[in-house]
Amino acid sequence: MIELEGLTKRYGPHLAVENLTLQVPAGQVTALLGPSGCGKTTTLRMINRLIEASAGVVRLNDQDTRRMRPEVLRRGIGYVIQQIGLFPHLNVAQNVATVPDLLGRPRQATARRVDELLALVGLDPETFRHKRPGELSGGQAQRVGVARALAADPPVLLMDEPFGALDPLAREQLQQAFSDIQRRLHKTVVMVTHDIDEALKLGDQIVLMNGGRLEQFGPPDQLIHQPASPFVRAFLGEDASLRQLAGRKVLALMEPGLPTAALPSVDAQLDARTALSVMLREGSDALSVTQEGRVVGVLRWAALSQPAAVQPATSPLSPSLDHSG
Ligand SMILES: Nc1ncnc2c1ncn2[C@@H]1O[C@H](COP(=O)(O)OP(=O)(O)OP(=O)(O)O)[C@@H](O)[C@H]1O
């Protein structure tokens, strides 16, 4: 668990982060969200002491991080940034192996681990192991960056806009890969994003910041349904519950069993917002759900509108707002 207590960063008279207190739960994804300049990156970097706090303390598993040597602290914390900073003269495998090599881990075990990690982030080891960073697309490089951060098997992972600078399709694929990995590995992840959809989709908890201060900290549902301030409500937008559906799988919301009547069908792996648009298009308040071509359940309107209050009159395909400054 990571505890922030009274965490503050001053640049001259300017308070970049002001008196931030919260507990980041272990094994979950906590998304730092907020408009440009609100202090997200500064907060993230105070956790691994790339930026030293002006006041306050960060505790990692009850240990005051000010008392730890920064390089020792950072060895236990994976760090992924948008411009991933792969070493151009090293190949993919060597890039992923940087930290295990640094730690003197046995070569063979590391080579196995590198292959495992590449496969985990969706890169075929045979094809990619020997490529140089210059031969990769942006999305592939980001994947290598995620694999590299996981290579030393750190319990904590800090990610700064890890899926930024990607086209929407690559972004979604990498978000999905990350979700799958996280379901298996249960890392304690703190992730900076200014993308509300991404925070709703990936965050178990959201830290919404504004002007260096904490506006609200809680699970996405709570921010959407019990906004602590007008800012929270305005920032997430009127269609927040609709957007939240984009992060939910039909599979998670359906009732198992066979429908009693013929219904339009959707695949269980689709997101709930897509299913909602099928309902609206077909004028049906229920859909049969298929998995690998077999009907496995029924998705009802009520499951989509609870707890997310969905108005049928609202367009499910409304474009997502960009709140970045
Ligand atoms: N080295 C610095 N010197 C002075 N001011 C700084 C410095 N780094 C950041 N700031 C200021 O601190 C505030 C918070 O910056 P920070 O990078 O944490 O914001 P952010 O929420 O991550 O923004 P973005 O989403 O645009 O990356 C901003 O007002 C920024 O201008």
Image (spheres, helix red, strand yellow):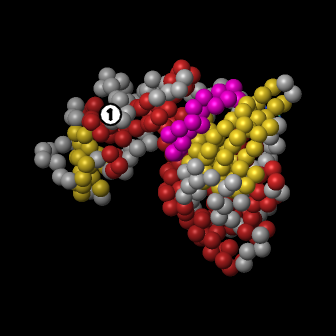
Instruction: Pick whichever, 24 or 177, lies toward us.
Output: 24
At a point 73% along the width and 31% down the height, the residue shown is: 18
Q: Position of residue 254 (x, y in %)?
A: 29, 47
Q: Position of residue 322 (x, y in %)?
A: 56, 28
* Residue 71 makes an appearance in the image: yes
Measured along the vertical axis of the image, is residue 267 above or below residue 104? above
Instruction: Pick whichever, 313 or 47, lies toward us.
Output: 47
- Which region shows up in magenta? 202-219
Relative placement, left or right, of 204 versus 86 is left
Measured along the vertical axis of the image, is residue 240 above or below residue 109? above
Residue occupied by mark 1: 305
In what quadrant does ligand 1 lie? top right
At a point 70% along the width and 47% down the height, the residue shown is: 81
Q: Where is residue 177 in the image (x, y as percent from the top left)?
A: 52, 54
Q: Residue furthest left?
A: 260
Which amino acid type is marked by label 1?
Ser
* Residue 138 makes an appearance in the image: no
Measured along the vertical axis of the image, is residue 178 above or below residue 12? below
At a point 56% along the width and 38% down the height, the residue shown is: 206
Q: Where is residue 214 in the image (x, y as percent from the top left)?
A: 64, 31
Count of numbered tags: 1
Measured along the vertical axis of the image, is residue 225 above or below residue 121? above
Q: In which quarter of the image is residue 121?
A: bottom right
| Label 1 beta carbon less than 8 Å to ligand 1 | no
Which type of secondary structure does the marked residue at label 1 adopt? helix
Q: Which residue lies furthest to the front in this view?
A: 62
At a point 79% along the width and 35% down the height, the residue shown is: 9
